[in-house]
Amino acid sequence: MINRYSRKELVKIWSEENKYKIWLDVEIAAAEAMEKFKIIPKGVASVVKKKGRIKINRIHAIEKKVKHDVIAFLTSITEQAGIKARYLHQGMTSSDVLDTGFNIQLVQSGNILLQDIEKILRVLKKKSMKYKLTPCIGRSHGIHAEPITFGLKLASFYAEFNRNKKRLTSAIEEISTCAISGAVGTYANIDPRIEKYVSKKLGLKPETISTQIIPRDRHANYFAVLALIASSIERVAIEIRHSQRTEVYELQEFFSKDQKGSSAMPHKKNPILSENLTGLARIVRSAVIPALENVALWHERDISHSSVERSIGPDANITLDFALNRLAELIDKINIYPQNMRKNLSLTRGLIFSQEVMLELTKKGLKREKAYRIVQKHAKNCFIKKSNLKDEISKDKSITNKINPKRINEIFSYNKHFKYINYIFRKVF
Protein backbone atom coordinates (compact mmCIF):
# COMPACT_ATOMS: atom_id res chain seq x y z
CA MET A 1 0.00 0.00 0.00
CA ILE A 2 1.06 3.59 -0.52
CA ASN A 3 2.33 5.44 2.55
CA ARG A 4 -0.60 7.87 2.46
CA TYR A 5 -3.00 5.16 3.64
CA SER A 6 -0.68 3.12 5.84
CA ARG A 7 0.12 2.92 9.53
CA LYS A 8 3.51 1.69 10.66
CA GLU A 9 2.18 -1.20 12.80
CA LEU A 10 0.59 -2.96 9.82
CA VAL A 11 3.37 -1.99 7.42
CA LYS A 12 5.81 -3.68 9.78
CA ILE A 13 3.76 -6.88 9.81
CA TRP A 14 3.78 -7.05 6.01
CA SER A 15 7.41 -6.06 5.61
CA GLU A 16 9.88 -8.50 4.09
CA GLU A 17 11.84 -8.36 7.32
CA ASN A 18 8.89 -9.67 9.33
CA LYS A 19 7.97 -12.27 6.70
CA TYR A 20 11.45 -13.78 6.73
CA LYS A 21 11.59 -13.56 10.53
CA ILE A 22 8.40 -15.63 10.71
CA TRP A 23 9.84 -18.13 8.24
CA LEU A 24 12.90 -18.43 10.45
CA ASP A 25 10.68 -18.95 13.51
CA VAL A 26 8.88 -21.77 11.68
CA GLU A 27 12.13 -23.45 10.64
CA ILE A 28 13.64 -23.14 14.13
CA ALA A 29 10.50 -24.52 15.78
CA ALA A 30 10.49 -27.45 13.34
CA ALA A 31 14.19 -28.07 14.06
CA GLU A 32 13.52 -28.05 17.82
CA ALA A 33 10.79 -30.64 17.33
CA MET A 34 13.01 -32.82 15.15
CA GLU A 35 15.73 -32.68 17.80
CA LYS A 36 13.21 -33.59 20.50
CA PHE A 37 12.09 -36.66 18.56
CA LYS A 38 15.72 -37.57 17.63
CA ILE A 39 15.20 -37.00 13.89
CA ILE A 40 18.16 -34.60 13.56
CA PRO A 41 21.20 -34.04 15.82
CA LYS A 42 20.91 -31.78 18.83
CA GLY A 43 22.11 -28.20 18.58
CA VAL A 44 20.76 -27.35 15.12
CA ALA A 45 18.01 -25.04 16.37
CA SER A 46 20.26 -23.22 18.82
CA VAL A 47 22.97 -22.61 16.21
CA VAL A 48 20.48 -21.30 13.67
CA LYS A 49 18.83 -19.14 16.32
CA LYS A 50 22.20 -17.72 17.36
CA LYS A 51 23.77 -17.18 13.94
CA GLY A 52 20.88 -16.90 11.50
CA ARG A 53 20.12 -13.32 10.50
CA ILE A 54 17.69 -11.92 7.98
CA LYS A 55 19.73 -10.47 5.10
CA ILE A 56 17.16 -9.30 2.59
CA ASN A 57 19.62 -8.19 -0.09
CA ARG A 58 21.41 -11.52 0.04
CA ILE A 59 18.12 -13.43 -0.22
CA HIS A 60 17.18 -11.35 -3.25
CA ALA A 61 20.56 -12.00 -4.88
CA ILE A 62 20.22 -15.76 -4.43
CA GLU A 63 16.60 -15.77 -5.58
CA LYS A 64 17.62 -13.97 -8.75
CA LYS A 65 19.65 -17.07 -9.62
CA VAL A 66 17.54 -19.92 -8.24
CA LYS A 67 14.09 -18.38 -8.95
CA HIS A 68 12.72 -19.75 -5.66
CA ASP A 69 12.16 -17.60 -2.60
CA VAL A 70 12.18 -20.31 0.08
CA ILE A 71 15.37 -21.92 -1.31
CA ALA A 72 16.99 -18.48 -1.43
CA PHE A 73 15.98 -17.85 2.18
CA LEU A 74 17.28 -21.24 3.37
CA THR A 75 20.54 -20.80 1.45
CA SER A 76 21.11 -17.42 3.06
CA ILE A 77 20.50 -18.83 6.57
CA THR A 78 22.75 -21.82 5.87
CA GLU A 79 25.57 -19.52 4.76
CA GLN A 80 25.50 -17.88 8.18
CA ALA A 81 24.71 -20.83 10.44
CA GLY A 82 27.18 -23.26 8.94
CA ILE A 83 27.14 -27.02 8.38
CA LYS A 84 24.50 -27.81 11.01
CA ALA A 85 21.94 -25.74 9.12
CA ARG A 86 21.82 -28.49 6.48
CA TYR A 87 19.31 -30.23 8.76
CA LEU A 88 16.81 -27.39 8.42
CA HIS A 89 13.63 -28.09 6.43
CA GLN A 90 14.01 -31.89 6.69
CA GLY A 91 10.98 -33.52 5.04
CA MET A 92 9.23 -30.18 4.68
CA THR A 93 7.97 -28.46 1.56
CA SER A 94 7.99 -24.76 0.75
CA SER A 95 4.28 -24.39 1.40
CA ASP A 96 4.75 -25.54 4.98
CA VAL A 97 6.77 -22.39 5.56
CA LEU A 98 4.90 -20.08 3.22
CA ASP A 99 1.39 -20.96 4.35
CA THR A 100 2.13 -21.13 8.05
CA GLY A 101 3.98 -17.83 7.77
CA PHE A 102 1.16 -16.19 5.80
CA ASN A 103 -1.38 -17.30 8.39
CA ILE A 104 0.74 -15.83 11.16
CA GLN A 105 0.83 -12.50 9.33
CA LEU A 106 -2.96 -12.60 8.98
CA VAL A 107 -3.35 -13.37 12.68
CA GLN A 108 -0.98 -10.54 13.62
CA SER A 109 -2.94 -8.17 11.37
CA GLY A 110 -6.30 -9.40 12.58
CA ASN A 111 -5.39 -8.81 16.21
CA ILE A 112 -4.52 -5.18 15.47
CA LEU A 113 -7.74 -4.78 13.49
CA LEU A 114 -9.62 -6.03 16.56
CA GLN A 115 -7.96 -3.28 18.60
CA ASP A 116 -9.02 -0.77 15.93
CA ILE A 117 -12.64 -1.93 16.18
CA GLU A 118 -12.46 -1.54 19.95
CA LYS A 119 -11.52 2.13 19.46
CA ILE A 120 -14.58 2.64 17.27
CA LEU A 121 -16.83 0.84 19.75
CA ARG A 122 -15.62 3.04 22.60
CA VAL A 123 -16.22 6.31 20.78
CA LEU A 124 -19.58 5.17 19.38
CA LYS A 125 -20.78 4.14 22.83
CA LYS A 126 -19.71 7.46 24.33
CA LYS A 127 -21.46 9.48 21.62
CA SER A 128 -24.54 7.23 21.67
CA MET A 129 -25.04 7.86 25.37
CA LYS A 130 -24.49 11.60 25.01
CA TYR A 131 -27.05 11.97 22.21
CA LYS A 132 -29.40 9.23 23.38
CA LEU A 133 -32.38 11.60 23.56
CA THR A 134 -31.37 14.14 20.90
CA PRO A 135 -34.27 14.17 18.41
CA CYS A 136 -33.58 13.97 14.68
CA ILE A 137 -35.45 12.81 11.64
CA GLY A 138 -35.29 9.23 10.49
CA ARG A 139 -35.12 8.89 6.73
CA SER A 140 -36.09 6.12 4.35
CA HIS A 141 -35.20 6.39 0.66
CA GLY A 142 -33.57 9.72 1.63
CA ILE A 143 -37.03 11.11 2.51
CA HIS A 144 -38.22 12.23 5.95
CA ALA A 145 -39.96 9.29 7.62
CA GLU A 146 -40.49 9.51 11.41
CA PRO A 147 -38.58 10.90 14.41
CA ILE A 148 -35.71 8.98 15.97
CA THR A 149 -32.76 10.19 18.05
CA PHE A 150 -29.20 10.72 16.97
CA GLY A 151 -28.14 8.37 19.76
CA LEU A 152 -30.17 5.60 18.11
CA LYS A 153 -28.33 6.13 14.82
CA LEU A 154 -25.02 5.76 16.61
CA ALA A 155 -26.25 2.76 18.60
CA SER A 156 -27.09 1.06 15.32
CA PHE A 157 -23.52 1.59 14.13
CA TYR A 158 -22.22 0.31 17.49
CA ALA A 159 -24.22 -2.92 17.21
CA GLU A 160 -22.91 -3.48 13.68
CA PHE A 161 -19.28 -3.02 14.68
CA ASN A 162 -19.83 -5.29 17.65
CA ARG A 163 -20.96 -7.97 15.20
CA ASN A 164 -17.89 -7.23 13.10
CA LYS A 165 -15.72 -7.78 16.15
CA LYS A 166 -17.25 -11.23 16.62
CA ARG A 167 -16.89 -12.03 12.92
CA LEU A 168 -13.24 -11.03 12.90
CA THR A 169 -12.51 -12.96 16.09
CA SER A 170 -13.98 -16.05 14.45
CA ALA A 171 -12.08 -15.44 11.18
CA ILE A 172 -8.80 -15.12 13.09
CA GLU A 173 -9.56 -18.37 14.86
CA GLU A 174 -10.24 -20.08 11.53
CA ILE A 175 -7.04 -18.81 9.94
CA SER A 176 -4.87 -19.78 12.92
CA THR A 177 -3.67 -23.06 11.45
CA CYS A 178 -0.27 -24.54 10.73
CA ALA A 179 0.73 -27.11 8.11
CA ILE A 180 4.01 -29.00 8.42
CA SER A 181 2.93 -32.02 6.39
CA GLY A 182 5.42 -32.18 3.52
CA ALA A 183 4.84 -32.65 -0.20
CA VAL A 184 1.13 -33.22 -1.04
CA GLY A 185 0.34 -33.25 2.69
CA THR A 186 0.86 -36.97 3.42
CA TYR A 187 3.60 -36.64 6.09
CA ALA A 188 5.56 -39.16 4.00
CA ASN A 189 8.91 -37.65 5.00
CA ILE A 190 8.00 -35.82 8.21
CA ASP A 191 6.56 -36.99 11.51
CA PRO A 192 3.12 -35.46 12.28
CA ARG A 193 4.42 -34.71 15.77
CA ILE A 194 6.57 -31.99 14.22
CA GLU A 195 3.44 -30.18 13.06
CA LYS A 196 1.85 -30.45 16.50
CA TYR A 197 4.97 -29.08 18.16
CA VAL A 198 5.34 -26.16 15.74
CA SER A 199 1.64 -25.33 16.00
CA LYS A 200 1.75 -25.15 19.77
CA LYS A 201 5.01 -23.18 19.78
CA LEU A 202 3.62 -20.57 17.35
CA GLY A 203 0.15 -20.32 18.90
CA LEU A 204 -1.62 -22.10 16.03
CA LYS A 205 -3.59 -25.32 15.50
CA PRO A 206 -2.53 -28.17 13.21
CA GLU A 207 -4.40 -27.99 9.91
CA THR A 208 -7.16 -30.62 9.81
CA ILE A 209 -6.03 -31.84 6.40
CA SER A 210 -3.67 -30.03 4.09
CA THR A 211 -3.03 -30.98 0.50
CA GLN A 212 0.32 -29.40 -0.17
CA ILE A 213 -1.16 -26.16 1.08
CA ILE A 214 -3.54 -24.93 3.74
CA PRO A 215 -7.01 -24.86 2.13
CA ARG A 216 -7.89 -21.40 0.85
CA ASP A 217 -11.50 -21.38 1.99
CA ARG A 218 -10.08 -20.25 5.34
CA HIS A 219 -8.44 -17.25 3.71
CA ALA A 220 -11.49 -16.42 1.60
CA ASN A 221 -13.54 -16.23 4.79
CA TYR A 222 -10.99 -13.91 6.40
CA PHE A 223 -10.98 -11.48 3.46
CA ALA A 224 -14.77 -11.61 3.23
CA VAL A 225 -14.94 -10.49 6.86
CA LEU A 226 -12.54 -7.63 6.11
CA ALA A 227 -14.87 -6.62 3.29
CA LEU A 228 -17.89 -6.66 5.60
CA ILE A 229 -16.06 -4.41 8.05
CA ALA A 230 -15.17 -2.06 5.19
CA SER A 231 -18.84 -1.88 4.21
CA SER A 232 -19.75 -0.97 7.78
CA ILE A 233 -17.18 1.82 7.64
CA GLU A 234 -18.78 3.07 4.44
CA ARG A 235 -22.24 2.97 5.99
CA VAL A 236 -21.13 5.42 8.68
CA ALA A 237 -19.22 7.51 6.13
CA ILE A 238 -22.28 7.87 3.90
CA GLU A 239 -24.40 9.01 6.86
CA ILE A 240 -21.83 11.70 7.62
CA ARG A 241 -21.56 12.75 3.96
CA HIS A 242 -25.32 13.10 3.65
CA SER A 243 -25.67 14.90 6.98
CA GLN A 244 -22.97 17.44 6.12
CA ARG A 245 -24.76 18.60 2.96
CA THR A 246 -25.56 22.32 3.14
CA GLU A 247 -29.32 21.79 3.09
CA VAL A 248 -29.09 19.19 5.89
CA TYR A 249 -26.09 20.32 8.00
CA GLU A 250 -26.71 18.11 11.03
CA LEU A 251 -23.09 16.93 11.15
CA GLN A 252 -19.78 18.33 10.01
CA GLU A 253 -16.32 16.82 9.91
CA PHE A 254 -13.81 18.58 12.13
CA PHE A 255 -12.15 21.38 10.16
CA SER A 256 -8.75 22.48 11.48
CA LYS A 257 -7.64 26.10 11.69
CA ASP A 258 -5.42 26.13 8.62
CA GLN A 259 -7.37 23.57 6.58
CA LYS A 260 -8.53 24.49 3.08
CA GLY A 261 -11.64 23.01 1.48
CA SER A 262 -11.22 24.06 -2.14
CA SER A 263 -8.52 25.55 -4.31
CA ALA A 264 -11.16 27.73 -5.98
CA MET A 265 -13.86 28.41 -3.35
CA PRO A 266 -12.70 29.70 0.04
CA HIS A 267 -16.04 28.99 1.74
CA LYS A 268 -15.93 25.24 1.13
CA LYS A 269 -15.79 22.68 3.95
CA ASN A 270 -16.07 19.29 2.28
CA PRO A 271 -16.57 15.85 3.94
CA ILE A 272 -13.24 14.67 2.56
CA LEU A 273 -12.50 12.10 5.27
CA SER A 274 -15.85 10.36 4.82
CA GLU A 275 -15.44 10.38 1.05
CA ASN A 276 -11.96 8.96 1.49
CA LEU A 277 -13.36 6.16 3.66
CA THR A 278 -15.90 5.32 0.97
CA GLY A 279 -13.03 4.93 -1.50
CA LEU A 280 -10.88 2.87 0.87
CA ALA A 281 -13.82 0.54 1.52
CA ARG A 282 -13.89 -0.22 -2.19
CA ILE A 283 -10.21 -1.20 -2.09
CA VAL A 284 -10.76 -3.65 0.77
CA ARG A 285 -13.84 -5.19 -0.85
CA SER A 286 -11.92 -5.68 -4.09
CA ALA A 287 -9.90 -8.42 -2.35
CA VAL A 288 -12.91 -10.71 -1.94
CA ILE A 289 -13.31 -12.04 -5.50
CA PRO A 290 -9.59 -12.91 -5.88
CA ALA A 291 -9.66 -14.59 -2.45
CA LEU A 292 -12.68 -16.66 -3.46
CA GLU A 293 -11.05 -17.63 -6.74
CA ASN A 294 -8.00 -18.83 -4.80
CA VAL A 295 -10.09 -21.62 -3.26
CA ALA A 296 -10.22 -23.71 -6.44
CA LEU A 297 -6.61 -24.72 -7.15
CA TRP A 298 -5.34 -27.57 -9.32
CA HIS A 299 -5.19 -30.93 -7.54
CA GLU A 300 -3.01 -30.76 -4.41
CA ARG A 301 -1.67 -27.30 -5.24
CA ASP A 302 -0.63 -24.75 -7.80
CA ILE A 303 0.76 -21.26 -7.30
CA SER A 304 -1.97 -19.20 -8.94
CA HIS A 305 -2.98 -18.05 -5.46
CA SER A 306 0.51 -16.86 -4.56
CA SER A 307 0.67 -13.66 -6.59
CA VAL A 308 -2.85 -12.78 -5.47
CA GLU A 309 -2.01 -13.13 -1.79
CA ARG A 310 1.20 -11.14 -2.11
CA SER A 311 -1.07 -8.24 -3.13
CA ILE A 312 -4.30 -8.64 -1.17
CA GLY A 313 -2.59 -9.72 2.05
CA PRO A 314 -0.86 -6.42 2.73
CA ASP A 315 -3.26 -4.20 0.77
CA ALA A 316 -6.53 -5.27 2.39
CA ASN A 317 -5.17 -5.43 5.94
CA ILE A 318 -3.15 -2.21 5.81
CA THR A 319 -5.99 -0.30 4.14
CA LEU A 320 -8.61 -1.51 6.59
CA ASP A 321 -6.39 -0.68 9.56
CA PHE A 322 -5.94 2.86 8.26
CA ALA A 323 -9.67 3.25 7.54
CA LEU A 324 -10.72 2.01 11.00
CA ASN A 325 -8.38 4.44 12.73
CA ARG A 326 -9.51 7.29 10.50
CA LEU A 327 -13.16 6.51 11.27
CA ALA A 328 -12.55 6.38 15.03
CA GLU A 329 -10.90 9.80 14.97
CA LEU A 330 -13.57 11.20 12.64
CA ILE A 331 -16.43 10.15 14.94
CA ASP A 332 -14.59 11.36 18.02
CA LYS A 333 -14.00 14.85 16.61
CA ILE A 334 -17.16 15.32 14.54
CA ASN A 335 -19.24 18.46 15.02
CA ILE A 336 -22.86 17.66 15.87
CA TYR A 337 -25.62 20.26 15.51
CA PRO A 338 -28.75 19.28 17.52
CA GLN A 339 -30.42 22.62 16.72
CA ASN A 340 -30.28 21.81 13.01
CA MET A 341 -31.64 18.33 13.69
CA ARG A 342 -34.65 19.95 15.40
CA LYS A 343 -35.02 22.41 12.55
CA ASN A 344 -35.04 19.58 10.01
CA LEU A 345 -37.65 17.71 12.05
CA SER A 346 -40.03 20.59 11.38
CA LEU A 347 -39.35 20.90 7.65
CA THR A 348 -42.42 18.89 6.62
CA ARG A 349 -44.68 20.74 9.09
CA GLY A 350 -45.96 17.74 11.00
CA LEU A 351 -46.20 15.22 8.15
CA ILE A 352 -43.90 12.90 10.09
CA PHE A 353 -46.82 12.19 12.46
CA SER A 354 -49.15 11.00 9.67
CA GLN A 355 -48.95 7.32 10.59
CA GLU A 356 -50.19 7.87 14.11
CA VAL A 357 -53.15 9.94 12.86
CA MET A 358 -54.08 7.09 10.52
CA LEU A 359 -53.72 4.46 13.25
CA GLU A 360 -55.84 6.50 15.64
CA LEU A 361 -58.63 6.64 13.05
CA THR A 362 -58.54 2.85 12.68
CA LYS A 363 -58.84 2.54 16.44
CA LYS A 364 -61.97 4.67 16.20
CA GLY A 365 -63.60 2.29 13.73
CA LEU A 366 -62.46 3.35 10.24
CA LYS A 367 -61.10 0.78 7.82
CA ARG A 368 -57.37 1.14 7.33
CA GLU A 369 -57.72 1.90 3.61
CA LYS A 370 -60.19 4.73 4.26
CA ALA A 371 -58.12 6.17 7.11
CA TYR A 372 -55.03 6.06 4.86
CA ARG A 373 -56.82 7.92 2.06
CA ILE A 374 -58.08 10.64 4.42
CA VAL A 375 -54.66 11.31 5.94
CA GLN A 376 -52.88 11.07 2.58
CA LYS A 377 -55.26 13.68 1.11
CA HIS A 378 -54.37 16.12 3.88
CA ALA A 379 -50.67 15.31 3.52
CA LYS A 380 -50.80 16.14 -0.20
CA ASN A 381 -52.57 19.42 0.57
CA CYS A 382 -49.86 20.29 3.08
CA PHE A 383 -47.24 19.86 0.36
CA ILE A 384 -49.18 22.02 -2.08
CA LYS A 385 -50.26 24.75 0.35
CA LYS A 386 -47.16 24.52 2.58
CA SER A 387 -49.50 24.19 5.54
CA ASN A 388 -49.23 22.23 8.79
CA LEU A 389 -50.75 18.75 9.01
CA LYS A 390 -52.07 19.35 12.50
CA ASP A 391 -53.91 22.47 11.32
CA GLU A 392 -55.31 20.64 8.30
CA ILE A 393 -56.74 17.69 10.20
CA SER A 394 -58.08 19.96 12.94
CA LYS A 395 -60.38 21.50 10.30
CA ASP A 396 -61.71 18.15 9.11
CA LYS A 397 -64.84 17.15 11.03
CA SER A 398 -64.58 13.56 9.80
CA ILE A 399 -61.39 13.43 11.88
CA THR A 400 -62.25 15.72 14.82
CA ASN A 401 -65.50 13.85 15.37
CA LYS A 402 -63.39 10.80 16.15
CA ILE A 403 -60.20 12.28 17.64
CA ASN A 404 -60.52 15.02 20.25
CA PRO A 405 -58.14 18.04 20.37
CA LYS A 406 -56.25 16.70 23.41
CA ARG A 407 -55.47 13.45 21.62
CA ILE A 408 -54.45 15.34 18.48
CA ASN A 409 -51.92 17.31 20.55
CA GLU A 410 -50.57 14.05 21.99
CA ILE A 411 -50.17 12.61 18.50
CA PHE A 412 -48.11 15.58 17.34
CA SER A 413 -45.35 15.09 19.91
CA TYR A 414 -42.18 13.00 20.10
CA ASN A 415 -43.13 11.11 23.27
CA LYS A 416 -44.45 7.97 21.60
CA HIS A 417 -41.46 7.73 19.26
CA PHE A 418 -38.95 7.76 22.10
CA LYS A 419 -40.70 5.65 24.75
CA TYR A 420 -38.70 2.48 23.99
CA ILE A 421 -35.27 4.05 23.65
CA ASN A 422 -34.10 2.68 27.00
CA TYR A 423 -35.27 -0.77 25.94
CA ILE A 424 -33.29 -0.52 22.67
CA PHE A 425 -30.18 0.75 24.47
CA ARG A 426 -30.33 -2.12 26.94
CA LYS A 427 -30.39 -4.57 24.03
CA VAL A 428 -27.45 -2.89 22.30
CA PHE A 429 -25.22 -2.10 25.24
Image (tube, helix red, strand yellow):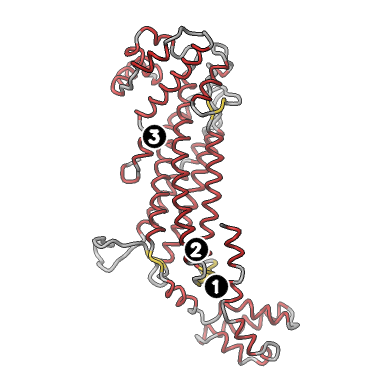
In this view, the residue in front, 68 or 126, is 126
Is 160 above or below relative to 349?
above
User: Which mark is nearer the camera, 2 or 1?
Assistant: 2
- Marks 2/3: CA–CA distance: 36 Å
The dot on residue 49 is none
Which of the marked residues, 2 or 3, is nearer the chain's N terminus? Answer: 3
In this view, the residue in front, 6 or 8, is 8
Residue topped by disc 2: 129
Residue topped by disc 1: 147
User: Which mark is nearer the camera, 2 or 3?
Assistant: 2
Disc 2 crowd, CA 10 A, few/some/many (<14, 14-19, 20+): some
Residue topped by disc 3: 13
Residue at 38 percent of width and 52 percent of height: 326
Where's residue 6, x and y in %? 35, 43
Does residue 257 appear to the left or right of 242 in the view shown? Answer: left
Disc 2 residue type?
Answer: Met
Disc 3 residue type?
Answer: Ile
- Marks 1/3: CA–CA distance: 46 Å
* Label 3 SS: helix
Q: Kindly indicate the quadrant of the structure image that contains residue 85.
A: top left
